Each structure stands twice: as structure tokens, then as C-alpha cells.
Image: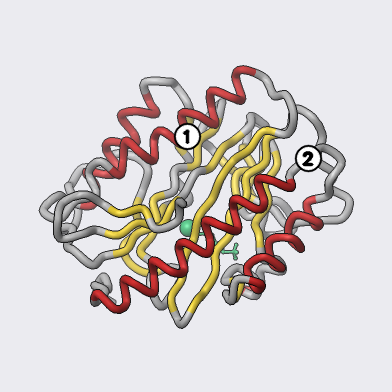
Amino acid sequence: MPISVKTDEELDLMRQAGYMLAQVHEKLHEVLRPGMSTLEIDQIGEEEIRRLGGIPNCKGYEGYPASVCISVNDEVVHGIPKAETILKEGDIVSLDTGLTYKGFNSDAARTWGIGHISSEAEKLIEVTKQSFFEGIKYAKAGNHLYDISRAIDKYVTSYGYGIVRELTGHGIGRSLHEEPLIPNYRKLTRGVLLKPGMTLCIEPMLTMGKRQVAILDDDWTIVTADGSVSAHYENTIAITPNGEPEILTII
Ligand code: MF3
Ligand code: CO
């Protein structure tokens, strides 16, 4: 499948799906507090997605059982919400969720600290977010895909954090995961040419320690191999005709 290029009408639906998801993340950020279970967060997320008129796109995806992927501390992505997983002061929690609206998908992730967290964890979260913004600077028609990857790698490496390689960003549209894959590390080529109407999920996943990851026995949860903490930041974006990329999943 070639990379899908959206018409103006399709882009408008992507925009609506993105705006709805930004509201879901805002709601989740508001309710997060120590003592809460990750299952409660998932339930609030699903309720908010449906209240806004969307359909959760994680739930049932290849059998994934929840609407919000919730990954705590050394969990990188795809953690499964549970009644027994209770957030406590000092934890960092990554929330990765998405929705479908009128046939189009949005996908975004945020990492938040619970109460007071260590300054090291604070810094990891900040650099993870900023690495997205370093990457998106290159998300312009006429640039090439891996220019984005290179910019993320260059910025992150200057802080010494690990960049997870086993998972990448991706195209998005009528399907949650479309071509192309978007690595967060440097490639030897520049990759495909970026064109207006392409919609992409850029999603750096960083670790405080080494970059290697492992998968838990639940066959979903990706954790750092060395037990170090991890952060994730993702938005759905559009390549525009006027040069500046548009972020669809922020308010
Ligand atoms: N938003 C997630 C991603 O792009 C979706 C995960 S699929 C799920 O990787 F099955 F884990 F939900
Ligand atoms: Co994604």
C-alpha cells in the first residue's frame, strides 16, 4: 500500500478526530491522582471517547483488551490497565490512546508524573516531548521522512537517553497503522519524499537507561530490559501545502 494522501475533506475529518482525542487527553490529565487504578483511567478514557462521539481504536486491536494503553515507570508502551495497578506518588505513567471518528483515526500519547516525581524523571519526560518537536520541524513537503527520524535521534542522543527501536511512529488515516514506519533513530537513507495530505504519527519512546526492551508474559506490555523508566510522547500530524506541519491532537 502506498502512503495515503488525504483530500481536504478527509483532512477535515482527521482534524475532528484529532481534536476529540486532544480533549480526551486533557480529561485524563485532569483526573490523574495517586491512589487511582489504571483500570479506572481506562474506563474514564473510554467513556470520554464515546461521549464525544468517537470509537476507541485500541480496544480489540489485534486483541488488545482496553481503550487506553497505560504504561507505568519501566513499562514503555502497551501496558494493560488493571484494577490492581494503583498509581502512587513518584510514578510516571504513559497514556497512549486513539479513536475513530467518521472512519478516520487519531492517535496520541502523553507521559505524566504522579504527584512529585524525581528531577531525573521530569527531565526524561521533558526531553521526550521536546524530541517530538525537534522531529516535526522537518515534517514539511519537500523534506524526506527520515529527516524527522534523524532530528529526533540527534536531539535525544545529546542527552544520553535510550531510543527504543523495536517500535516506531507510523502513517495514519482510515487505518490506525498505515505506511510508512517512522523510526525515532537515524537511518542511512533519507526515506520517502513528504507530500501535502500525508498524516503521520510521530512518537518517540525514550528510556533513562539502555534502549533494549523486552515483552512481558501477557504478550503486550513492553518494558525496558534494564528496568529503567521510560517516557512516550505522540501526536497525529498533517503535512500541509503551506510548509508548516499541523498538529491534529493538541488543543
Ligand atoms: N496508539 C498505539 C500505537 O500506535 C496503539 C496501540 S495498539 C494497541 O502503537 F493494540 F496496543 F492498542
Ligand atoms: Co501510534
Indicate the position of residue 237 as horizontal and vertical percent values: 35, 56
Q: Quadrant of residue 42?
A: bottom right
Q: Number of labelled discs?
A: 2
In the rendered view, would you say 98 is above or below 243? below
Q: Secondary structure at mark 1?
A: helix
Name the image quarter holding residue 43.
bottom right
Residue identified by numbered label 1: 128
Residue projecting furthest to the left: 142
Residue type marked 2: Arg
Q: Residue furthest bottom?
A: 102
Report the residue at 49% width, 44% height from top.
233
In percent of width and height, residue 104 lies at 43, 76
The reply to whether callout 2 and callout 1 are in contact (CB within 8 Å) is no
Circle 1: residue type: Thr
Q: Secondary structure at mark 2?
A: loop
Q: Is residue 98 left or right of residue 203?
A: right
Question: Mark 2 — residue?
Answer: 33
Residue 56: x, y in percent?
A: 61, 71
